[in-house]
């Protein structure tokens, strides 16, 4: 089954204004892009002719343009839908995903994959996209000092993303946060001066802080940002 046929089938299942990209790793992904965000939905692998998983994700470009300024923004994820299990009393409905994998090498199976994708979009992806619309939506969850929780919140680089969000949102604790982390790095480097990974993390942290020094905040601080909105399905 050729790629063009699969893409045309999948395009009919996607929400309005989504388009499909064939990524360098041969995965098909559906995207919606505007000035601030890239919404993504993983659809399947062309190399394997399989849909093994369906997963929704979001790239907040206000964060990622600072964290990964020279990388393809369509290949970067700030959060994926698995964040919900860490925050809400919510589990993804397994009835859809349990029917995977589905082959993409004949029309009948492609139609089945399309049906499952459409169910997933309606039941899971749209509520996820509706909730995470702005980087300020993260603020109620970033007040914790539990870095393990922060790591679970994001798709990698959790602490760095917290620092960036606090800066862009004019959080009053920003300066204290970066100084506290700087002191932690200094202590750890003193104890493990030959730790190359630690030194790499420190260099990355310093680079981000220097970038943020030249970056204007996007939002004036307001305590109402700390009020968590409900997750509605």
Image (spheres, rainbow, N blue to C red):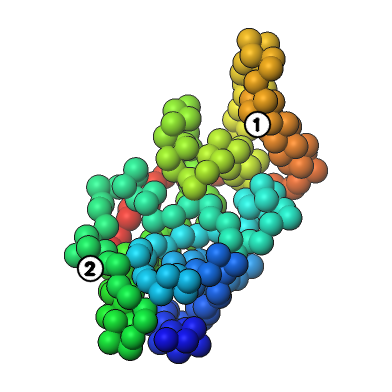
* Relative image position of residue 63 (x, y in whole percent): 62, 51
The answer to which quarter of the image holds residue 125 is bottom left
The residue tagged 1 is 201
Q: For this view, does 97 lie left or right of residue 43?
A: left
* Relative image position of residue 91 (x, y in whole percent): 25, 53
Residue 222, placed above or below residue 8: above
Q: For this view, does 64 lie left or right of residue 15?
A: right
Residue placed at 34% from the left, 43% from the top? 86
Q: Residue 111 carries which label?
A: none
Residue placed at 28% from the left, 87% from the top? 108
Residue placed at 60% from the left, 67% from the top? 24
Asked whether residue 161 is in view, the answer is: yes
Most foreground residue, 168 or 129: 129
The answer to which quarter of the image holds residue 164 is top right
Q: Which residue lies furthest to the left in this view?
A: 95
Look at the numbered disc 2 and give the secondary structure of its residue. Answer: loop
Residue placed at 53% from the left, 52% from the top? 78
Gap in angstroms between the C-alphas marked 1 and 2: 40 Å
Q: Which of marks 1 and 2 is in front?
A: 2
The residue tagged 2 is 99
Residue 155, placed above or below residue 203: below
* Relative image position of residue 62 (x, y in whole percent): 64, 55
């Amino acid at each position: 089954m050729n790629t063009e046929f699969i893409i045309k089938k999948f395009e009919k299942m996607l929400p309005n204004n989504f388009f499909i990209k064939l990524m360098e790793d041969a995965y098909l992904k559906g995207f919606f892009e505007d000035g601030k965000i890239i919404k993504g939905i993983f659809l399947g692998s062309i190399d394997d002719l399989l849909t093994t998983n369906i997963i929704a994700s979001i790239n907040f470009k206000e964060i990622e343009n600072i964290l990964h300024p020279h990388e393809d923004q369509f290949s970067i994820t700030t959060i994926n839908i698995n964040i919900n299990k860490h925050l809400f009393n919510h589990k993804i409905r397994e009835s859809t995903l349990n029917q995977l994998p589905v082959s993409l090498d004949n029309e009948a199976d492609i139609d089945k994959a399309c049906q499952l994708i459409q169910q997933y979009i309606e039941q899971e992806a749209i509520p996820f996209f509706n909730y995470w619309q702005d980087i300020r939506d993260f603020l109620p969850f970033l007040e914790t000092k539990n870095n393990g929780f922060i790591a679970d919140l994001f798709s990698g680089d959790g602490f760095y993303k917290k620092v960036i969000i606090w800066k862009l949102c004019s959080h009053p604790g920003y300066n204290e946060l970066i100084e506290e982390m700087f002191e932690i790095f200094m202590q750890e480097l003193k104890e493990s001066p030959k730790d190359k990974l630690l030194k790499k993390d420190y260099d990355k942290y310093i680079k981000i802080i220097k970038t943020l020094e030249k970056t204007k905040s996007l939002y004036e601080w307001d305590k109402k940002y700390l009020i968590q909105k409900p997750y509605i399905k």
